[in-house]
Image (cartoon, rainbow, N blue to C red):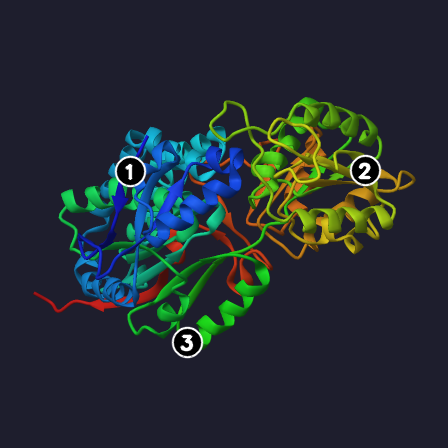
Amino acid sequence: MKFGIYPAYICGRDVTGENAQLVHTLAARALIEDTFPTLGLKRDLDLGVTDSHTAGERVVGACVVADESMTTLALESAAAAAPEWRRVPLGERIEIGRRIAKRILEHLDPLVEILVAEGTPRSAAQGMIGGLPYTSWSRETLEWCAEQMEFRRWDGDREMILRRVPDGVVCINPPQNAAAVNALNGLTSLIAGNTVVVRAPRGVALSCMYAMREIVAPVLEEAGAPPGTINALCGPPMLDAWMASEHVDDILYFGGSKKGLEFEGECIAAGKKPILELAGNDCCVVWHDADLDATVETLTQFFMNSGQICNVPNQVVVHPAIADEIIERLVVATRRIQPGYPDEAGVVLTPVLGVDWFFGCLGEALSKGAKLVHGGRRLEVDGSPSETGFFVEPSIVRVDGLGNARSLSVVRDETFFPLLPIIVPDAGTDDEALLEEVLAFVNTNAYGLRNSVWSTGTSTIERFLEGIVNGGNLKINDSHSGFLPFLPNQGGPGLTGGAFGEASHPMLRTTRLQGVSVIRPAD
């Protein structure tokens, strides 16, 4: 399936600029099967020395690379459209949101095909995109957010209003590992009355531009939204231009914690609102009375995309009474997870870029007493061990004791590879004291995306429900990685969301609270 060339979309029209440069998307299968010739072909296509018509089925599509003038035009267009768009009644914007959700489903199949071509396993692509109409774009989510937008009371003849007003121009910088889904999630800021500029990362530009151009833009055009309400362009990093622009109010930034927190300070100094989606180092707690079948199922979610996504259980604390059984069951389930091409059914592993990082963390853990219970090898696409394979075998290490667990990087830091630490507290501690230790361990995690707990005991559930305050999401006996309607699926404190981090609905995070009092003149 081929998708042609996508120009930039600015102020309601396609823009190519002068001397347009293209960035091409080549099928991930071709890159895995015949890496260096395919990379050479991509280089030649991007340089314009080879014609895409002669490249066969390996070429999926291309996007125009924006230049500086196009970046400026997109910001100016968003700023020009902002006053008119925010005057559109909230109810009409909510209806537009419902139409966008419907159109996501109508375009699910082609968007999934692009994501698969970019390297996302089919099952993950279907789950991420297909879930959006039922999560961040669901009726429940949009209506709940709308309820937070305005509250009125009367004090005699004085009308008092607490309302959230749109910030203005919102720029979205989605991550390379999940650009389309995060851009679509961030676009709920449109429903709050903001106008938007989306930068499609060059490495996965096609899926992002397809989503903006074929799904969102037509709905806004049909609804009569002012040109410039949404602007989308592929290009090099634009953060410096956004920071320097008088037109920009908010920046949705996705990335690693170190650079993200530095960027937060730069944003504040420049008078911009930083909305950060940084690293996740999620914790999953398994108590002695857990449903082990359901628990093992959720723990294997860690290996989706080879652990290269943020919403998976990166570290697991298991009650010592069931630790051996959990590990045994998990190893059995993990052995069934094999590499493959992203277009094949059931494949969840993807090539791992940080192989040296993986072996460095594994070596450090083993040197400090952790035990490798499964994995630890590079694999070829057919699952055979190899010194040069693109894939990493799903791997599990056992870490005994909570006290020194965070001395290990694989526990302390977010990892982006398939190495799961199972932390087993000391067996001699009574359950009451152990529960307090586990609560303290979870709450002192420097990251704050999501946590999950598995227990069938009513009193234990209540203790965890009351005691876990870290994280933007808490799941109890529910899929750690699953997304739900109404509940925010992103956001959190600490190294996950910065100083202003919290569970994040972009529709609300891109607004600010305003208090209004009105005494109307007598008739």
Looking at the figure, which quarter contains the C terminus?
Answer: bottom left
Q: Nearer the viewer, residue 349 or 330?
A: 349
Q: Residue flagged by tag 1: what amino acid is it?
A: His
Q: Residue flagged by tag 2: what amino acid is it?
A: Leu
Rounded to the nearest angstrom, the CA distance separating label 3 from label 1 is 46 Å
Which residue is under mark 3? 270
* Numbered label attached to residue 53: 1
Q: Residue at x 41, y 76 (%)?
A: 270
Given this view, does label 3 or label 1 mark the residue nearer the observer? 1
Q: Nearer the viewer, residue 362 or 427?
A: 362
Rounded to the nearest angstrom, the CA distance separating label 1 from label 2 is 49 Å
- The residue furthest left is 523
Which residue is under mark 2? 372
The quadrant holding residue 383 is top right
Above or below: residue 343 compared with residue 160? above
Q: Residues within 10 Å of mark 2 (few under 14, many from 20)?
A: some
Count the marks: how many? Answer: 3
Q: Residues within 10 Å of mark 1 (few under 14, many from 20)?
A: few
